[in-house]
Image (cartoon, grey):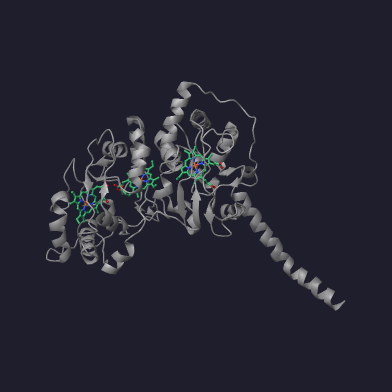
Amino acid sequence: MKLRRVFAIAALVLLPFVLAAAAVVGVLFARQGGFAPYRVPHGGGRAVAGDAATIARGEYLARLGDCVACHTTRGGAPLAGGRAFATGIGTVYSSNLTPDRDHGIGDWSADEFAHAMRHGVARRGPLYPVFPYAHFAGVSDADLDAIYAWLRAQPASDFVPPPNRLEAPADSRRALIGWRMLYYRPDQTAPLDPSDRGRYLVEGLGHCAMCHSARGERGSLPPEGHFAGGVIPGVGWYAPPLDSVQLQRYSEQQLADYLRDGTSPHGSAYGPMAEVAYASLRWLTSEDALAIARHLKQIAPSPLRPQPTAVAAQTDASGKGADVYARACADCHGKNGEGENGAYPPLRDAVAVTAPDPINAVRMVLYGGMEVTTTGNPRPHSMPPFVQQLDSAEVAAVVNHIRRTWGGQDSRLTDDDVDAMHGIVID
Ligand code: HEC
Ligand code: HEC
Ligand code: HEC
């Protein structure tokens, strides 16, 4: 009797907490889209035009979405999946998108495909956000259908990508429902208007924000970090903010050319941006490139973006960094970091020297880089690796020198910092 009373009182006391918890769960579940994302349409559905013009349009759009680069592993069949993506919680492998009925998406209807692209949920459950569905969500029906038609026209492959290697509880797709409740807010992104072409491509298929935004907890992309720049998780390179301040030094035309050519008088694409330029952006029509450039140059700076630093340019002309620079770098990048137009990028105001994080500069000096080959840059220039020629103290000194002198960064790297950045796997 006594015990029952204790339970009754305990239940009464706890009830409000249980109800409050249920209400919170309900609200969070509604905010990630409610039940709709989990109702995956199977089979049947409407027919999609598969004429040559639609397929060609689909190919162009798929290039902007970079589907092939992410869905192909080195040496593997195109679109058959298996490329590994390192994330904070383990490795996720891309899936087979070829028309193979058993191993690809051969038996998917156009509706099922559009659903996965819009909601990030497939038959097998919610998909990991390395698949940029949050960005693809705003792509028009007509464009998704064209991509679907193009995918159907590609050769089938029965390749089976390796299973994901993830830590518990993230290894369960159900756990992704929890992640979505905490971090996925489809209602906070304004719908995309295809007639606003630049914005439509940047925020949609281009999924530029996937790399160029500041990350929140557990790989999330909070709206306040949109295009604020940041270090890309799993990859380690720093991607700069994309806004009117960052892109001030480019004219609209120069920026459009940078996207298509992978090079410009203000910088060349390297690291993950080189892959984006090579696999995706070099295919842009000149009109689309210009529309994108116009849009990018109008983006208002996010409050979370690093403020351009006010540190006065400090020269240490007598120091070790300046010595190394004069000896090893000035031939290409110029005595005053001005570069050589049409051949070597300037270091003044370059991404790697103005970035709050020194990782790009250190990596470039250690391992060098090669510009991408494009129609507009048929004979790309390259930078040699210095890992064999300079010791860690010299690398730290020269990176401090260029970041202080031309980037306004109060850079104080030591040889230990450089050692710690050695051997980072380069993708
Ligand atoms: C940044 C890399 C990346 C890009 C770009 C990308 N994908 Fe993916 N995609 C993935 C990964 C990784 C998965 C697997 C996710 C998982 O296992 O949850 C995936 C899954 C998918 C799925 C679900 C397949 C299934 O069997 O469940 C579809 C459909 C898909 N992608 C289509 C596309 C299309 C179409 C494009 C181009 C417009 C594209 N993806 C671009 C990485 C990418
Ligand atoms: C896979 C990651 C990734 C994606 C996706 C990506 N970028 Fe980048 N981007 C980078 C990195 C890293 C850099 C810095 C290295 C460099 O300057 O090449 C960069 C640099 C740039 C720059 C040079 C900025 C400057 O100040 O010189 C521009 C412009 C740019 N990206 C535009 C875009 C656009 C537009 C898209 C979408 C169509 C995009 N990026 C998608 C990673 C990415
Ligand atoms: C043979 C010519 C050459 C030499 C020597 C050279 N570089 Fe470079 N550097 C380049 C080229 C070309 C690129 C663009 C590479 C790319 O796009 O992959 C580049 C890119 C860079 C970048 C990235 C700039 C950005 O836009 O963010 C940095 C930083 C850099 N170099 C620093 C140095 C330093 C420091 C040295 C001396 C230790 C040096 N470079 C020596 C040719 C050179």
Give x and y (percent) for residue 284.
36, 33
407 vs 186, left or right, is: left
Q: Is residue 371 visible?
A: yes
Give x and y (percent) for residue 277.
34, 40
Can you say whether 252 is above or below 127 in the image?
A: above
Quadrant location of the N terminus in the rendered image: bottom right
Give x and y (percent) for residue 396.
24, 64
257 vs 110, left or right, is: left
**Which of the 4 quarters of the picture holds residue 18?**
bottom right
167 vs 313, left or right, is: right
Give x and y (percent) for residue 378.
24, 35
**Residue under the point 28% across and 46% down:** 248
Name the foreground residue: 247 vs 136: 136
- The residue at the far bottom in this view is 2
- Number of marks drawn: 0
Q: Is residue 243 visible?
A: no
**Residue under the point 57% across and 31% down:** 110
